[in-house]
Image (cartoon, rainbow, N blue to C red):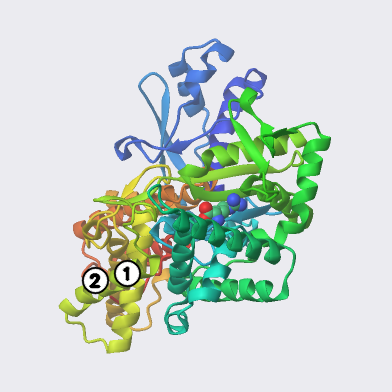
């Protein structure tokens, strides 16, 4: 919690010590936001837990604490309720002072380094909407941790190595469509992959000639992979070109999403180290041969077996992740490494973390954490390549912008075309992101356009509109009161809904900290939605521009603080907050 609540805690603590002296030593009183505003603004429930230590009924303890409170210039008043709750009602002037830096976040991450591995798509494959959650959740965490003072290294661990490259190289040489490649590089590389992969297969009812042809194609693909791995200049050049083309396409999407990485080290970056990883596992007595492959048996840990070297000598995903984390520890000395992927990789990360543990690879000060999320589904089913109902992320964003544009056009704004297009992008992308971020990552999302783009209810556009409406109210205020600066006005906060709104604003830093600690951006989204609702009760209940000047100025100030908090929160979620909609 922020320093203001600490001040209230110290006020109570002084009373506890005054009332009970040494008997209370070692107890630190804590307060929390009241569960119901009817009972006050904050509450302290610690009298219950002190009954045994102080050998008194909780209510008597609460009475003694309240009786001993210093009332002189006190920040609040306190009352006892029920068996010994202390309800605290803060002073309007205390609230006003606290609000001055309500959007300042505590630097809980100062001196700490965090690596976040997110997005991490695979080269030569389109980023489809199954990837959106890693990119969007990972980026929100990236922004949140950074705002809390952490030194964050955002690493896009792209899948740029593996046997699929032999398949693509072979196909590229045999049936590349240059024009298609220029039009949509990833689409064409994907087509080549699918076609070339198809040629390695022959059905059960295939003729012997067809089977031989499939085998021949497969062998040729393998040869290309081996040549690539051995550094053949032509294959290396092609492979580099595939990466360049893919990154170009990924970057277009990242630009639309406002996502920036600090480093992009793909799987290939660690290739030289993989043999060494297997050797160290063997030296530690953790690896053994099985059917020609090398495995780490984790069945005693209930984690099955992890293959670290295939029969053909190739290395696995686990092997690469071990090399990757060793490199990250060496290069960044992080306090935590966070991996954001979908739920299907849970076993992989459990195995990999367990192996690191057994190898003693990760120093005691460093934590490894897998933040997994449920897959996103359309009402008709999972969005996945295998099921064929693949929706590309790009298509999804285009559609979101198109639909947002239709809403903007319908409300006949006198904006020019460029301004409308910009707004459509802000609203469309914001809607997609918020539809994702407003859910607990570990739940499955059924994505529907109606919900994502709804102008009412818990949606991105709703919060953007709420923010823009406050901005336009403030414009009117400035026009009506020339020279006025809303934040210079004295805050009065005498009405109940004003207090509720003010207290809600003060919960912002706590919500950001909780979102970070739980790695759940939805905690922040929920907070912002609650804030917009407190604002709307306030706005509906009291006149603002028509109120008496001192009250009007105070309310304008509160509006400004609300807008600022909404903007700061949306920014942490990676969502833009245009001032005019
Ligand atoms: N490229 C992988 C995929 O698309 C995700 C990589 C996640 N990061 C990691 N260090 N394993 O499934």
- Distance from the alpha carbon under mark 1 to that under mark 2: 7 Å
| Residue 106 appears in the figure | no
Give the quarter of the figure containing the C terminus.
bottom left
Quick one: which residue is furthest to the front in this view?
Answer: 208
Q: Residue 15, percent across and down?
A: 56, 30
**CB within 8 Å, label 1 to label 2:** yes
Viewer-closest of 320 and 75: 320
- Judged left or right of residue 362, residue 180 is left
Position above or below: 368 against 200:
above
Position above or below: 420 against 577:
below
Viewer-closest of 327 and 371: 327
Viewer-closest of 213 and 497: 213
Residue topped by disc 1: 428
- Judged left or right of residue 440, residue 323 is right
Which residue corresponds to the image point at 46% horizontal and 17% vertical from the top-left? 58
Q: Residue 379, percent across and down?
A: 24, 51
**Of pointers 1 and 2, the one earlier in the residue sequence:** 2
Q: Residue 277, percent across and down?
A: 77, 46
Tell me the SS state at disc 2: helix
- Quadrant of the image occupied by residue 426: bottom left
Quick one: which residue is furthest to the bottom in this view?
Answer: 416
Which residue corresponds to the image point at 57% horizontal and 23% vertical from the top-left? 19
| Residue 212 appears in the figure | yes
- Judged left or right of residue 412, residue 310 is right
Which residue corresponds to the image point at 60% horizontal and 49% vertical from the top-left? 338
Residue topped by disc 2: 403
Viewer-closest of 505 and 393: 393
- Quadrant of the image occupied by residue 37: top left
Tell me the SS state at disc 1: helix
- Judged left or right of residue 215, residue 426 is left
Q: Residue 454, percent across and down?
A: 22, 61
Mark 2 surroundings: few (<14), some (14-19) or many (≥20) residues within 10 A: some
């Amino acid at each position: 919690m922020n320093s203001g609540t600490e001040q209230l805690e110290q006020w109570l603590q002084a009373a506890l010590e005054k009332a009970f002296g040494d008997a209370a030593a070692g107890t630190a009183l804590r307060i929390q936001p009241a569960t119901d505003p009817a009972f006050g603004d904050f509450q302290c429930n610690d009298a219950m837990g002190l009954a045994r230590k102080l050998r008194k009924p909780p209510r008597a303890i609460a009475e003694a604490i309240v009786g001993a409170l210093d009332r002189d210039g006190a920040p609040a008043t306190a009352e006892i309720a029920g068996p010994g709750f202390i309800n605290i009602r803060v002073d309007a002037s205390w609230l006003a002072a606290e609000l001055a830096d309500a959007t300042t976040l505590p630097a809980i991450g100062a001196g700490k380094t965090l690596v976040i591995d997110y997005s991490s798509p695979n080269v030569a494959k389109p980023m489809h909407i199954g990837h959106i959650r890693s990119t969007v959740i990972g980026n929100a965490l990236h922004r949140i941790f950074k705002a809390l003072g952490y030194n964050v290294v955002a690493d896009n661990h792209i899948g740029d190595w593996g046997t699929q490259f032999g398949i693509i190289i072979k196909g590229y040489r045999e049936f590349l469509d240059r024009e298609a490649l220029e039009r949509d590089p990833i689409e064409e590389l994907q087509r080549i992959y699918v076609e070339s992969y198809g040629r390695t297969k022959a059905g059960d009812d295939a003729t012997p000639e067809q089977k031989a042809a499939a085998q021949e194609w497969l062998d040729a693909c393998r040869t290309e992979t081996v040549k690539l791995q051995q550094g053949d200049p032509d294959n290396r050049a092609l492979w580099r070109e595939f990466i360049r083309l893919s990154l170009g396409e990924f970057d277009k999407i990242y630009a639309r999403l406002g996502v920036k990485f600090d480093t992009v080290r793909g799987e290939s970056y660690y290739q030289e180290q993989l043999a060494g990883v297997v050797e160290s596992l063997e030296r530690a007595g953790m690896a053994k041969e099985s059917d020609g492959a090398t495995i780490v048996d984790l069945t005693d840990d209930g984690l099955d077996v992890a293959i670290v070297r295939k029969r053909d000598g190739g290395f696995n995903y686990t092997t690469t992740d071990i090399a990757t984390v060793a490199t990250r520890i060496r290069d960044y000395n992080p306090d935590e490494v966070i991996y954001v992927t979908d739920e299907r990789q849970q076993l992989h990360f459990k195995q990999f973390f367990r192996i690191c543990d057994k190898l003693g690879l990760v120093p005691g000060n460093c934590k490894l954490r897998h933040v997994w999320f449920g897959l996103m589904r359309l009402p008709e089913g999972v969005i996945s390549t295998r099921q064929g109902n693949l929706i590309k992320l790009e298509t999804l964003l285009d559609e979101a912008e198109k639909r947002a544009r239709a809403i903007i056009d319908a409300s006949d704004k006198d904006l020019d075309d460029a301004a409308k297009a910009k707004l459509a992008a802000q609203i469309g992308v914001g809607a997609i992101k918020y539809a994702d971020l407003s859910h607990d990552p570990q739940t499955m999302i059924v994505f529907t356009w109606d919900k994502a783009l709804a102008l009412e209810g818990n949606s991105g556009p709703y919060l953007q509109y709420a923010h823009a409406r406050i901005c336009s109210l403030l414009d009117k205020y400035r026009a009506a009161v020339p020279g006025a600066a809303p934040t210079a006005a004295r805050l009065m906060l005498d009405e109940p809904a004003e207090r509720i709104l003010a207290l809600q604003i003060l919960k912002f830093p706590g919500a950001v900290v909780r979102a970070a600690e739980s790695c759940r951006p939805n905690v922040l989204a929920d907070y912002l939605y609650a804030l917009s609702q407190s604002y709307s009760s306030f706005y509906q209940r009291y006149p603002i521009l028509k109120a008496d000047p001192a009250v009007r100025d105070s309310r304008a100030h509160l509006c400004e603080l609300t807008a600022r908090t909404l903007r700061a929160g949306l920014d942490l979620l990676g969502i833009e907050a245009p001032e005019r909609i």
